[in-house]
Amino acid sequence: MEISSTITEARPQKFALPVDSEHKATEFRLFSAAAPHMRAFHLSWISFFSCFVSSFAAPPLLPIIRDNLNLTATDIGNAGIASVSGAVFARIAMGTACDLFGPRLASASLILLTAPAVYFTSIASSPVSFLLVRFFTGFSLATFVSTQFWMSSMFSARVVGTANGVAAGWGNLGGGATQLIMPLVFSLVRDIGAVKFTAWRIAFFIPALFQTLSAFTVLIFGQDLPDGNYQRLQKSGNKQKDQFSRVFYHGITNYRGWILALTYGYCFGVELTVDNIIAEYFYDRYNLKLHTAGIIAASFGLANLFSRPAGGMISDMMAKRFGMRGRLWALWTVQTLGGVFCIILGQVGSLSASVVVMIIFSIFVQAACGLTFGVVPFVSRRSLGVISGMAGGGGNVGAVLTQLIFFKGSRYSKETGITLMGVMIVCCTLPILLIYFPQWGGMFCGPSSEKIATEEDYYMSEWNSEEKEKGLHQASLKFADNSRSERGRRVHSAAVPSNATPPTNV
């Protein structure tokens, strides 16, 4: 892919929020819809929410669907695995698509491509067709990557954890909301006069329509970057067309991305697993009514209203005082505690205790997701989309492996599977100890003292001398300057370079 050799500065613009030298917002105003920053936030979480509703619309109706389609426990397990496996490679591809074409076009295209699978769920007539529609619907979960990429492109280092956490958390609310929405829609359709084996099929038109409308909303009202859309900026020379091979190479060769993919597999991956099994678990183990089991299951997903955003906010607060090392310590601590409560959930035997422990478990595991994407934006500037895709794909890999090992067929009871899943969380969180940034340090080591290690050194290493001569590294240079806040309290005593630009309304 050819790269333009000229760079022109973007025209001065006025923004409703204060911005840094990259025009990224330095404040996060939740109840604002100001373009382009907060508008992008609301479009991203609503579209991701719609995809979660669609992908997990089936589990709350499984007691009805399994009777209609004669599904066995193995069939249900396979369908659950299929629903999250499709997004593994889709998330990596989505990250690359965001790097090259922008989050707006990438997310809207995927949402539209997967919407037909949701409509087709209503005509599923066998275990195989049910598995296929869940598989293709699950591809839409890759919009998570575009959501995180979009927020990292719109918000500065000081608030990016909060922005990522709230956007993803509110999007993930769809996994809980659908536990309430689908039984309610099913009941309404049945009360109108449809038999139950027809009512569940009609119910699927609601999430399908919602998903379709969200895609068109993103296309019409969204904007890739603070300064405009990728296509217009590339045509005007204000944004360069990067080479796919270089973007991909710098992403997959950064070991920090692989560690975060593993650990994310056992916070978000666990969340996906629980979304698939929890309603049926309470329905079967405690002999509850379908609607009651759905309400309890919904409480797990609905905790995303505050838990994942809280993870992002904690990450930013820890960074303000302790820098990147604070982000890493917070992530390891919270995710490990999530694993402990998951173990406890599998051991308790009463309904009330199970509900209480499940809610506590959900808060910690979802907060860990927010904390993870407080770290991801700093792993790579040039390959942000690839790193986001790797981490996001790791979440789906974790869900697939967990369901294959512990919840496929009848090898383990669900309570035993939940306990063993908790052990996996604790073990797979340990590699966070190995993450180290030369300019900021790691959990147990401070920044490198053997040589001068700065933010510029780290992010400029992704560009060769020829690319630097063409000026293609300028965006990374600005990002490096704005990332000095990851030093924590050290940043206040550090010298500020002459080209640093303070946050301002421009």
Image (cartoon, rainbow, N blue to C red):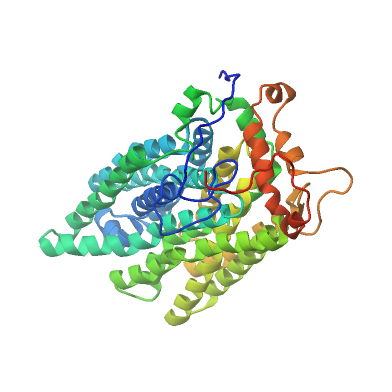
Q: How many marks?
A: 0
Q: Position of residue 250 (x, y in %)?
A: 66, 34
Residue at x-position 13% and y-position 58%? 194
Q: Position of residue 74 (x, y in %)?
A: 41, 54
Q: In which quarter of the image is residue 31?
A: bottom left
Q: Position of residue 165 (x, y in %)?
A: 52, 57
Q: In this view, does 416 lie above or below 75?
A: below
For this view, does 48 lie left or right of residue 270?
A: left
Q: Nearer the viewer, residue 377 or 501?
A: 501
Residue lying furthest right in this view?
450
Residue at x-position 22% and y-position 61%? 186
Q: Nearer the viewer, residue 47 or 347?
A: 47
Q: Nearer the viewer, residue 349 or 434?
A: 434
Q: Where is residue 4 in the image (x, y as percent from the top left)?
A: 57, 19
Residue lying furthest left in this view?
193
Residue 416 in view here? no
Residue at x-position 81% and y-position 44%? 453
Q: Quadrant of residue 248?
A: top right
Q: Is residue 252 above or below residue 414?
A: above
For this view, does 16 lie left or right of residue 398?
A: left
